[in-house]
Image (cartoon, coloured by chain):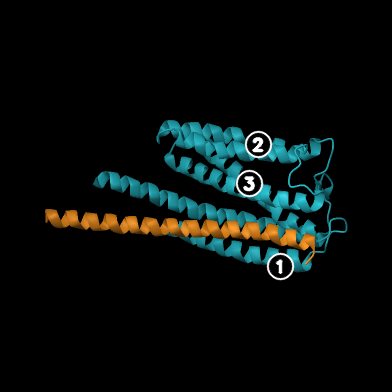
Amino acid sequence: MSTGEKYLWAAYLVVFATVLVYVVLIALKVGRLERELTALAELTREREGGHG
Amino acid sequence: MQGFRHSAALLSLTAAVLLITGLSLAVFWAPEDADQGISQKIFYVHVPVALTSYAAFFWAAWKALRLLWKGGSRYDLESYTAVHMGVIFGALTLVTGSIWAKVSWGHWWVWSERQLTLFLILFLFYSAYFMLRYSTDPGPRRERTSAVYAIFGVVLIPVSFLAIRLAEGLIHPVVFKRDGPDMEGSMFLTFCVCLAAMLALAGSLYLLELSGKRADASLRELRERLA
């Protein structure tokens, strides 16, 4: 592989790795939001149970 | 919300198809440049990424303008998300540009190049947006200050874009001239596909990030109500 080719693949790899990391971060965020939503739904059910 | 999800899914699918097509065209179909050789193919990533970051900053300013004009927290969140996208694509522009500079000029960065320095200033200006945003308490004041800042940044874009044409000692190549693109038809087609791919990618990431930020804000409000 020539030097030019190495730099070319490095540039492409940087872009795709960044996008991949970003998508993983968004997936982690969605996971956290889902956990928080479940906890809030549980809290709401407990409160409704307490009132009933 | 259902329509929003469909739009995000459709845009993500379009981005994936265009990215695969663009990369294939750039690697296997577009001819090598006579002067620069294979390293010129960095252009198919670097320029679309740079133009996408400009587009994101314009979108952020447009949303900021709507906030100042009509009011409404949704515009603040949209403008903030667009700046977020612009900064990510701006960072990618600097990195891919530096890689190209290293192989073509033998240096990672050339300070005498106005195009590079102005893009760096633009990038740092929008990076400071986050510092400004998080140094103020949430509320209408923060929304208005962030909006004004996002609009001011847009002034730097035409300066950054035109700097290459205004520069006296040209090192950075000029591809798009007044009489059209200075490249072969196959190269231009590949560039257009790559540009469409980057715009679709940024659009889908924007929609994903925006839905996450909206859900986060709704959950915060629910938590406060339940506390």
- Label 1 sits on what residue type? Ser
Q: Chain of mark 2?
A: B
Q: Residue at x 76, y 59 (%)?
A: B41
Q: Position of residue B177 (x, y in %)?
A: 82, 46
All told, the count of numbered labels is 3
Q: Quadrant of residue B198?
A: bottom right
Give the CA separation, mark 3 to mark 2. 11 Å
Q: Name the element at disc 3.
A: helix
Q: Say which colour chain B has.
A: cyan
Q: Quadrant of residue B26?
A: bottom right
Residue A1 appears in the rendering: yes
Give the CA separation, mark 1 to mark 3. 24 Å
Q: Residue at x 68, y 55 (%)?
A: B195
Q: Which mark is residue B121?
A: 2
Q: Position of residue B76 (x, y in %)?
A: 47, 40
Q: Earlier in the sequence, mark 3 or mark 2?
A: 3
The residue that label 3 is drawn on is B90
Q: Position of residue B118 (x, y in %)?
A: 70, 37
The residue that label 1 is drawn on is B24
Q: Say which colour chain A has.
A: orange
Quarter of the rendering occupied by the C terminus of chain B:
top left
Q: Residue at x 62, y 47 (%)?
A: B91
